[in-house]
Image (spheres, helix red, strand yellow):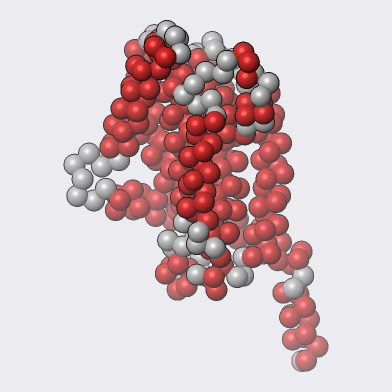
Amino acid sequence: MAERNQMKLTAKKNFFVELRSSYADFTEAFARFQLALNLAIQDTMARYRGSILGPWWITITSGSLILGIGLSYTYLLRIPIEKLVPYVAVGIVSWGYMASSISEGGESFVSSATILRQSSLPLPIFILRTMIRNIINLAHQLLIVVGVLVWFRIFPGVGILWSLIGLVAVTVNLGWLATLVALISARFRDIPQIVSSVLQFVFFISPIFWVVPPALEHSPFVIANPFFLGIQAIRSPLLDGGHFPALELAMLGAIGFFGWIFALVVYTVTRRRVVHYL
């Protein structure tokens, strides 16, 4: 009997046993996709309870920002408005989705602390909840992109498909980033504020609302900027005549592969401690 107990204790410390448990957690989370969806919808409704327009305020806010930047920067940068506004629209909407997924990912476990303490639900289901909630918000903002493309008579054709593939590649990368930030934030509560500050800095140094000048085409802020790669994977097929973003997708695929490996290792090591952190 003592030997069996010792074997169980030893098994708990075995990384590969924990890795199988991590796999089971993610499998169960996706099997309970409907639960994550319901929680995400509930979050969205709760956030805008009592509001007349609800999540459409996000659309109005983003639309105002895009219009303001488009009208002012077209004179500052001397770029025709019919080229700059679509560029800014897709960039701002894509960035908003990326930034909110990462920053809100840091709160995935902390905001669900009560549920985690009282249930045996797998941790990834709360990451999935955050991702779905941000996809719902993205769906509201996509109407801005559609409206801008129609207004300026830009019809991407097959580029819509390539852009959707780029969006999927971005979402896969956001998943491992949100997982990492959520795990670290459960232990260190200052991380969400640090992440928000870093994202604000990245927003200004990335070509989101400003067009890359020839002098910066080979700058590390452009060619080594994963956020710009993600935005271009979504934006270039829509605005460049159905261009297939092969390079961007290849790089996002490589980043996602190694990112998920790293995130799974961290998750496997810390999964049993998260509830204690909370």
Point out the image quarter for the N terminus: bottom right
- Residue beneath the point at 36% across and 14% down: 150
Q: Is residue 154 above or below residue 113?
A: above
In the rendering, at what x and y percent does residue 77 appear?
A: 45, 13
Q: Is residue 179 left or right of residue 112?
A: right
Where does residue 231 sit, x and y in percent of width and height?
Answer: 54, 28
Q: Residue at x 44, y 29 (%)?
A: 92
Residue 158 shows in this picture? no
The quarter of the picture where residue 71 lies is: top left
On the image, the x and y values in percent for residue 83 come to 45, 11
The residue drawn where x is 71% and y is 61% is: 19
Q: Is residue 260 positioned above or below 227 on the image?
A: below
Name the outermost residue toward the right: 3
**Number of numbered labels in the structure image:** 0
Residue 55 as seen in the image, left or right of residue 77:
left
In the image, residue 183 lies at what x, y percent?
57, 59
Q: Viewer-proximal residue, 170 or 25? A: 170
The image shows residue 143, relative to residue 128, as above or below, that is above
Q: Is residue 93 left or right of residue 162?
A: left
Q: Looking at the image, which residue is at 54% across and 31% down? A: 205
Of residue 193 and residue 165, the one placed in the foreground of this image is 193
- Let me know if residue 57 appears in the view: yes
- Residue farthest toward the bottom in the current orientation of the protein: 1
Based on the displayed image, in which of its 4 quarters is residue 76 positioned?
Answer: top left
